[in-house]
Each structure stands twice: as C-alpha cells, then as structure tokens.
C-alpha cells in the first residue's frame, strides 16, 4: 500500500487486507536499519484473525521515499501524519526498539487516537555506546555485523525443520545490508543518534493512558529487560510478557510474539 505523507510516498505492508477508512488498525513500526518486513509474521497472523494491519517503512527505509528523519519526535509526527493520510482514526501501535519510542511518543501526542500500545524490546533512555555510534558513522558494514551479533540469542543456524524455517541472524544481516545499499546516507548512524538523543520518554510514558503491553526478550542484551524499569514505573498498568529470545524477537520467536500481540489486541475489544 502506497500513501502520500507530507509530499513523499510512504509504503505500508497490509498482509493482503484492505484497511478501510475510519476502521481501527494495528500499525507496526520497525527499529533502526530495518523495514516493514521484520513484522511479516505478526502482520500475517493478525490479519488472519480479521484485523486491519499496516507495517510501515519509515522515511528513507525500504520503500518509503524521503530522507531518514533525524529525531524520534519527527518520526512520531510523521506516523500520525500517515494515520491521517490513510484515514485511520484509531490504532493499536506496536513498535520494536527505536519503533517502540516512536509508538510511545505518538501515543503521548495523540492519546485519543491510540487504543493500545505494544512496546517490544523497549527501554528509555535508549543510549547507544560511543563505540557503536562511531562505527555506524565510519564503518556501517561493521556496525551491521556488531548489532546482528548482539541482537540474537543464538547465532547457530536453525536446525532442519525448525519453526523458524530460516536462519534468523543471516536474514537480519541481509536486510540491514540491503537497506544500506538502498540508502547510503549513513542510515544506521542517523537512527542510532535519534535513539540516543530522545529526551522525552519519561514524560511520554507518564502521559500514556491506554492499555499497554511490554514484550521483552529474556536474553536481550541490546535492551535488557531490567533497563525498562523507568518506563514500567511510569506506566504502572502495563502488562509484561517475557519470551526466551534476544532483541530480534519477531524473527527469533515469531509465533510467541504473534500470540502475545494477538492476546493483547483481543483484550482490547
């Protein structure tokens, strides 16, 4: 699905659904150096259950045109503009990592439009080490390798017949490499700086009134569960689901993540 947002073409994967104007939808927001495809399993699972779904490509990522936005605040404003352009009045926002901050900020900006908030692999402050920031600036290929290694609980190839059906770390690395080729303008560095400098997470979390779900990877070393305590303290009504995986949870444990999201959305009705 192609949507005009602020004069640029934006892409959203709909899993074969036809989102209708005025009907609520589930909107998936990816993280740094990713695109909509990280949500394919979850979008399809929720679509099969009769939900309208939109897995977006942020500007400068995947099929969405325009330069990558430099701040989480700017991305949240863009997301709300996309909802306007798609005539989606209310939505469940599901964001992973950087995408979780975007979802959080959008929910704080427009509480009446968000019926539920799912934060996956989330933390705040979402600080990025100086070493990784510098590597992303000077050696994007090296930064991709570093993050790919840290994002997965296991880097061993999946066994034949495993539920994953593919080697998750290899697929993740190829995706990030492809995005680097599509947009050579230091995309990873731009995304990391946006995460590192986002200053409004505490205030945004304190403004959240809608049902909220945290999905955490027990073996996540990028955003360890313990690092989400500030957000959890600010959203005391939030529910937490822990999954045995690393940071790249949507591909490492696709069924478990889909089930957690489906149960959460079902409880909103």
Image (cartoon, helix red, strand yellow):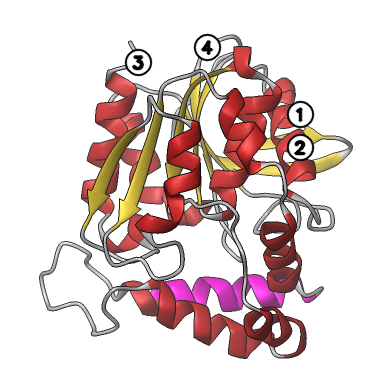
- The residue positioned 45% from the left and 28% from the top of the image is 17
Query: Where's residue 144, x and y in %?
Result: 56, 81
- The residue positioned 62% from the left and 65% from the top of the image is 127
The disc at residue 268 is: 3
Q: Is residue 62 visible?
A: yes
- Between discs 3 and 4, the one toward the N terminus: 4
Depth order, front residue of 138/231: 231
Q: Is residue 33 left or right of residue 9?
A: left
Marks 1 and 3 close (CB-CB < 8 Å):
no
Foreground mark, 2 or 3, reads 3
Q: Is residue 89 visible?
A: no
- Between discs 4 and 2, the one toward the N terminus: 4
Q: Main secondary structure of the magenta part?
A: helix
Depth order, front residue of 22/235: 235
The residue to which callout 4 is attached is: 23
- Between discs 2 and 3, the one toward the N terminus: 2
The residue to which callout 1 is attached is: 81
Q: Under tag 2, what secondary structure?
A: helix
Marks 2 and 1 close (CB-CB < 8 Å):
yes
Query: Where's residue 96, x and y in %?
Result: 49, 50
Q: Is residue 195 left or right of residue 151?
A: right
Q: Find the distance from the CA under tag 2 to the CA under tag 3.
A: 25 Å
Q: Find the distance from the CA under tag 4 to the CA under tag 2.
A: 20 Å
The disc at residue 175 is: none
Q: Find the distance from the CA under tag 3 to the CA under tag 4.
A: 15 Å
The residue to which callout 2 is attached is: 78
For label 2, count other residues whose C-alpha is less than 10 Å away and answer few (under 14), some (14-19) or many (20+): some
Q: Under tag 4, what secondary structure?
A: loop
Q: Find the distance from the CA under tag 1 to the CA under tag 3.
A: 24 Å
- Between discs 1 and 3, the one toward the N terminus: 1
Residue range corresponding to the magenta coloring = 171-184
């Amino acid at each position: 699905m192609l949507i005009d947002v602020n004069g640029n073409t934006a892409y959203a994967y709909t899993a074969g659904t036809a989102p209708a104007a005025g009907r609520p939808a589930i909107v998936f927001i990816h993280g740094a150096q990713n695109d909509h495809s990280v949500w394919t399993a979850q979008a399809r699972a929720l679509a099969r259950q009769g939900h309208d779904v939109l897995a977006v490509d942020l500007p400068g990522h995947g099929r969405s045109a325009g330069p990558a936005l430099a701040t989480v605040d700017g991305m949240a404003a863009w997301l709300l503009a996309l909802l306007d352009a798609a005539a989606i009045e209310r939505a469940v926002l599901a964001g992973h990592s950087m995408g979780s901050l975007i979802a959080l900020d959008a929910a704080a900006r427009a509480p009446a439009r968000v019926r539920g908030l799912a934060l996956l692999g989330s933390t705040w402050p979402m600080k990025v080490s100086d070493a990784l920031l510098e590597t992303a600036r000077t050696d994007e290929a090296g930064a991709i390798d570093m993050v790919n290694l840290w994002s997965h609980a296991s880097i061993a190839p999946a066994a034949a017949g495993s539920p994953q059906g593919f080697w998750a770390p290899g697929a993740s690395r190829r995706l990030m490499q492809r995005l680097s080729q599509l947009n050579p303008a230091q995309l990873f560095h731009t995304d990391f700086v946006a995460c590192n400098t986002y200053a409004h997470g505490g205030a945004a979390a304190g403004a959240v009134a809608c049902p909220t779900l945290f999905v955490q990877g027990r073996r996540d070393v990028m955003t360890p569960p313990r690092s989400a305590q500030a957000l959890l303290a600010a959203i005391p009504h939030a529910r937490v689901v822990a999954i045995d995986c690393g940071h790249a949870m949507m591909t490492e444990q696709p069924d478990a993540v889909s089930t957690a999201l489906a149960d959460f959305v079902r409880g909103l009705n």
